[in-house]
Image: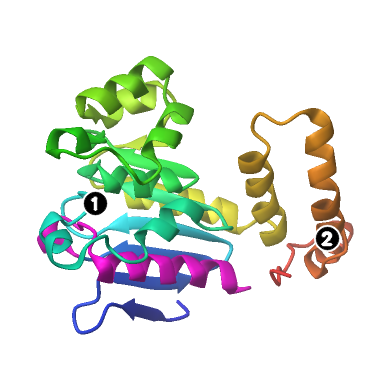
């Protein structure tokens, strides 16, 4: 363990812990179902920046304290402080490095939109997923209407958007929305195991692999290779690029620097 950082004052809304090239990020408002107020939004944004800025980190795992992942925006806080600060920037930009969501209980409304900002989703059986904003006079404004149809069949994504109904994690897994489906209580353990496999790989290779997959959807082959060229050169010329080749030749495990 390389230390714990708490964000959010006396009762931190977001906790972070760096360990073995993994940043564990915990939404920490269990008394409010981890609903998003400004303290949580700003804490989540700060945690994402920490993941991206530290060379000793390769991947993040995002989870929620208590009985569920996140119930979305704190409507009581919204009436007092308006839109939660930090949330819009996080759901728009996410993180440059891979982020895995570990979901127990529920990820609904803005909570699911936060999860969809992540690259891989791990959820426990029985967890409820959906964007029910239409039931309370709103619509999903945190990227769910963009990202949900990319992870689910069009008809199902449209049904969820229009009805506000929730689906169980089991059904989401059947349609390929989840990377892993676990037994209740095991989502964080499975997400950590997945993160450990990623953390063993080249940090720059991982970061730019994520970027290429995300940015190149729907692009032509010519656009793909033109976009890839400078990033590939950057990785080949990096310290880790040389370390990977040297370690392979010397038949030893590489020691990554993240640069």
Judged left or right of residue 103, residue 58 is right
- On residue 234, which mark appears? 2
Query: What's the residue at 66%, 29% (across, down)?
Result: 218
Percent position of residue 120, x then y:
47, 43
Q: Main secondary structure of the magenta part?
A: helix
* Residues at circles 1 and 2 in contact by the CB criterion of under 8 Å: no
Percent position of residue 118, x then y:
45, 48
- On residue 230, which mark appears? none
Q: Does residue 106 belong to the magenta stretch?
A: no
Based on the displayed image, in which of its 4 quarters is residue 126 positioned? top left
Question: Circle 1 is placed at which residue position?
Answer: 70
Query: What's the residue at 81%, 59% (across, down)?
Result: 235
Seen from the viewer's position, the closer of residues 141 and 253 is 141
Q: Which residues are magenta?
A: 29-56
Percent position of residue 56, x then y:
60, 73
In the image, farthest residue toward the bottom: 10
């Amino acid at each position: 363990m390389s230390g714990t950082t708490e964000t959010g004052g006396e009762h931190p809304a977001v906790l972070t812990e760096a360990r073995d090239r993994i940043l564990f990020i915990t939404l920490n408002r269990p008394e409010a179902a981890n609903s998003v107020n400004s303290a949580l939004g700003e804490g989540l944004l700060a945690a994402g920046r920490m993941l991206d800025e530290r060379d000793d980190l390769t991947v993040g795992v995002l989870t929620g304290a208590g009985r569920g992942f996140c119930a979305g925006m704190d409507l009581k806080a919204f009436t007092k402080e308006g839109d939660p600060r930090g949330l819009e920037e996080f759901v728009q930009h996410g993180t440059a490095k891979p982020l895995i969501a570990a979901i127990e209980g529920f990820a609904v409304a803005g909570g699911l939109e936060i999860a969809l900002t992540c690259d891989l989703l791990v959820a426990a059986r029985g967890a409820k997923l959906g964007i029910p904003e239409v039931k309370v006079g709103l619509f999903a404004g945190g990227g769910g209407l963009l990202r949900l149809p990319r992870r689910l069949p069009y008809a199902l994504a449209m049904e969820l958007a229009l009805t506000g109904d929730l689906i169980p994690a089991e059904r989401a897994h059947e349609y390929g929305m989840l990377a892993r489906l676990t037994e209740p209580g095991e989502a964080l353990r499975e997400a950590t195991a997945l993160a450990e496999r990623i953390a063993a790989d080249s940090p720059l290779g991982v970061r730019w692999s994520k970027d290429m997959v995300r940015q190149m959807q729907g692009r032509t082959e010519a656009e793909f290779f033109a976009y890839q060229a400078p990033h590939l050169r950057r990785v080949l010329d990096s310290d880790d690029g040389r370390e990977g080749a040297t370690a392979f030749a010397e038949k030893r495990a590489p020691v990554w620097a993240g640069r």
